[in-house]
Image (cartoon, rainbow, N blue to C red):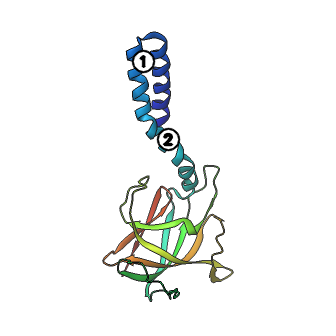
Amino acid sequence: MIRLLLILSIVAVVFAIRYLPFWASLGIALLFLLNLRFLVRYLFTLPFKAKGAVLRGASVRVNDVTSSAAPAREESGAEPPETPERDFYLLDVTITPEPAKGQFRLWEPGDLALVKAGSKAGNDDAEPEGEIENIQVWKDGAFVSDEEYKYEGEQRLRLLAGVQRGVKELSFRYYFEIFGIIKLP
């Protein structure tokens, strides 16, 4: 849709310059410039949408959800910033992508975010409902710290998540893709 609008806009500007009076050409060029911000946004988000497509339609199997204590914070001497009250949970989940269709086949658990269940895919304004504090990956029969690796295919993860109080259902967001439902106790 955006590509079609871009092509039509360029054709309209060229047609206007060639065949219309000056004032009409100027008006069409002005309309093109006003729509340029949409074009820039589209071009900027295109690589992120392509990278996130690896988890489009991914499924989430929730193995376990347990309440947890807040992670220990380092004392820096400075006053900590104001943060909303959060409940902490250990989420043991298995994320299974659909078979890869694009050129991106790898995904990073560190790029996952938690959003309100029912958020719309493609909505980069979906507010995070929780923050993932720690990520561990299942490897050789035990959970080990994620070293910010990229993985292909299904992965079992244990996530320490701080979730805003009162939230009972979450989904994962990976760039512009939203998938899975996690019900909290």
Residue 156 is tagged as none
Residue at the far left: name it: 166
The residue that label 2 is drawn on is 40
Query: In percent of the image, x 55 and y 65: which residue is there?
Result: 111
Q: Three-letter amino acid code at disc 1? A: Ser
Position in image of residue 102 (x %, y %): 61, 49
Say which mark, if any, is on residue 25: 1
- Badge 1 crowding class, 10 Å Cα cut-off, few under 14, some 14 to 19, many 20 or more, is some
Question: Horizontal and vertical percent for residue 115?
Answer: 40, 66
Residue 172 appears at what percent x and percent y? 46, 66
Q: Residues within 10 Å of mark 2 (few under 14, many from 20)?
A: few
Q: Three-letter amino acid code at disc 2?
A: Val
In percent of width and height, residue 66 lies at 44, 85
Provide the secondary structure element on which disc 1 rests: helix
Q: How many marks?
A: 2
> In the orientation shown, which residue stands out farthest toward the right?
140
Label 1 near label 2: C-beta < 8 Å?
Answer: no
Asked if residue 37 is positioned above or below residue 131 in the image, the reply reads above
Q: Is residue 74 left or right of residue 119?
A: right
